[in-house]
Amino acid sequence: QVKLQQSGAELVKPGVSVKLSCKTSGYTFSTIYMSWFKQIPGQSIEWIGMIYAGDGGTGYNQKFKGKATLTVDTSSSTAYMYLSSLTTEDSAVYFCARHNNYFDYWGQGVMVTVSS
Amino acid sequence: NIVMTQSPKSMSISVGDRVTMTCEASQNVQNNIAWYQQKPGQSPKLLIYYASNRYNGVPDRFTGSGYGTDFTLTINSVQAEDAAFYYCQRIYNSPTFGGGTKLELK
């Protein structure tokens, strides 16, 4: 069955960067897009961007350009999101999800806390 | 940018009731809408895609309808496990989510 397993929670200081992972199984990784999302607790869901695992092509929400960089490793069927120069406003839960026009499978989410 | 507006923001109902929540798009999105259910501490779960198609394994008490700018999610005979947040999402270019509707059980 399809699974998306995200890396563990992060507690980081302001100014630091972090790389989140989303390891997939149960489907052909290179044939489908992967999207990433941000959700501040108690708020709605924001789409950050997407990446096509077949060729690494990306598309980003303008709001997150310069903040998030999406990559993939097809050899391990893993998607990554690099978040740069973190501030307290980046504290949130981040999800990956398989992007099949709609989002049919989701990772469990990872909490990123930015605090000095 | 297309804005998705959901209403009501919250609702409190009893088990067995029928509930309808709405999602309005600021521009015509045809049938390019999905609905998700999210419980606290969990990731969203896909319920409905392309406005009215029930996803695999979703109980048939969940029904989506609408086209263009106005969409509804109806839950017939609400069960206790339906207490959650519900989000609509515009499919395709720059996916956008509505603000959500919180469904509480009395």
Image (tube, coloured by chain):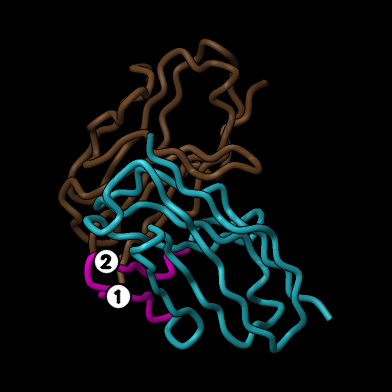
Chain colours: A cyan, B brown
Let me know if marks 1 and 2 both belong to one chain: yes
Taking the spot 25% from the left edge, 56% from the top edge, the residue there is: A32
Q: Identify the secondary structure beneath mark 2.
A: strand
On the image, the x and y values in percent for residue A106 come to 45, 47
Taking the spot 22% from the left edge, 72% from the top edge, the residue there is: A55
On the image, the x and y values in percent for residue B61 come to 38, 17
**Region of the chain picked out in magenta, as a range:** A46-63
Pick the front one: B76 or A48: A48
Q: Is residue A23 above or below residue A89?
A: above
Q: Residues within 10 Å of mark 2 (few under 14, many from 20)?
A: many
Q: Mark 1 or mark 2: name the one nearer the start of the chain.
A: 2
Q: Quadrant of the N terminus of chain A?
A: top left
* Cβ atoms under marks 1 and 2 closer than 8 Å: yes
Pick the front one: A46 or B99: A46
Q: Quadrant of residue A6?
A: bottom right
Q: Is residue A83 above or below residue A104?
A: below
Hey, which residue is sitting farthest front in the picture? A75
- Residue B105 among those drawn in magenta: no
Pick the front one: B64 or A88: A88
- Residue A58 among those drawn in magenta: yes
Dot 2 amino acid type = Tyr
Q: Identify the secondary structure beneath mark 1.
A: strand
Question: Which residue is disc 2 drawn over?
Answer: A52
Hey, which residue is sitting farthest right in the picture? A116
Q: From mark 1 to mark 2, how far is it between C-alphas?
A: 6 Å
Dot 1 amino acid type = Thr
Question: Which residue is disc 1 drawn over?
Answer: A58
